[in-house]
Image (spheres, grey):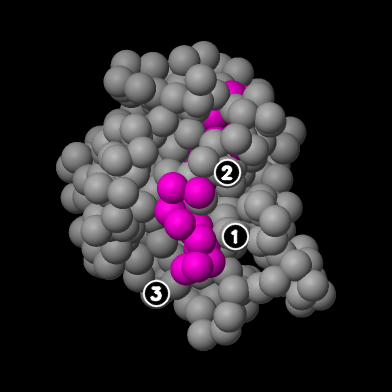
Amino acid sequence: MDEAFPDSSSTELGRALSSLGKSWYVLTSERPIALFKGALTGPTANVSRMCYDSGTSFESLIANLCEDLRRMKITNLHVGVPTDRTDLFLSRGFERAEILVRFSRAPIESKMMPILPLMNLTEKEIPILSKLMYDAYAKTSGAYSDAQSAENVIRNIMSEGYISGASFASGAFPNLVSACLVTRVYPSEANVSQVFTHPLYRARGLATTEVASAMNRLVNEEKGVTRLTVWSPEANDVMKRLLDKMGFVHDRKLVEMTSRLE
């Protein structure tokens, strides 16, 4: 943040992005104009952690971003932006979707006993997890339209930074009823990328147990992780109550802006 924006001759840029993972992209015009993290799932791109050259106009930045994504057959763009920048995106034809809040805390050990058997999750469980995730969100407005969409999300999570040892599902395999997927986003920070429970098994403390188990594993086996974060829609009161009860605090807010790329 304290350095000049990298120019096209920077050899450090490629090495830095490689160390961060394959979901980091460089947006270029005649030179690099932005760096961003992008999750491309089917026809949808979710862009986060964008930083751009202050010498580039915002209009040019968005125009180049949209043009590049169209070439990649992306038709829906979602960008999480600070609240003070929403007017810029609105002026470029974006629509305001929902407000996302981040909760975080330092991982701690707990003696919470599992309500149902717990198992760690690997790519072998993706088909079962996809069906569970679809069932969990099936009646939620704007959620995943089919099991394939859910599978794409889970595969994207497991493709980079995924911590299998800190990701848990509840139930007797193959009848899993709740799951918590954790990734490492920075050397010192892990994130609960997804937590979902089948409607028939909600309000039983399964998600609480899974998050607590994730923290236990992070404390004991993932050295250097000093913070666990969770992003949630501001309107999700159930998740807010769960995280409040577990000592998480709200420390950041973003507005999700969406655009249809015609």
Q: Which residue is mark 3?
A: 106
Is 257 a magenta residue? no
Q: Are marks 1 and 2 in contact (CB under 8 Å)?
A: yes
**Residue drawn at point x = 68 percent, y = 31 percent:** 72
Residue 100 at x, y percent in the picture? 30, 48
Give the amino acid at mark 3: Ala
Question: Which residue occupies the foreground of this view, 206 or 193?
Answer: 193
Residue 179 at x, y percent in the picture? 49, 39
Judged from this view, the residue extending furthest toward the bottom is 2
Give the amino acid at mark 1: Ile
Is 41 a magenta residue? yes
Spatial separation of the CA atoms under disc 3 and disc 2: 39 Å
Pair 3/2: label in front? 2
Q: Which residues are magenta?
A: 40-60
Spatial separation of the CA atoms under disc 1 and disc 3: 35 Å
User: For the residue carrying disc 2, how many other residues have a C-alpha within 10 Å: few (<14), some (14-19), or many (20+)?
Assistant: some
Which circle marks residue 126 in the picture?
Answer: none
* Image quadrant where residue 21 sits: bottom right
Residue 129 visible from this viewpoint: no
Question: Which residue occupies the foreground of this view, 80 or 8?
Answer: 8
Give the amino acid at mark 2: Asn
Pair 1/3: label in front? 1
Q: Secondary structure at mark 3?
A: loop
Which circle marks residue 33 in the picture?
Answer: 1
- Above or below 20: residue 260: above
Q: Which residue is mark 2?
A: 64
**Residue drawn at point x = 51 percent, y = 20 percent:** 262
**Residue drawn at point x = 30 percent, y = 33 percent:** 95
Residue 65 shown left or right of residue 210 in the figure: right
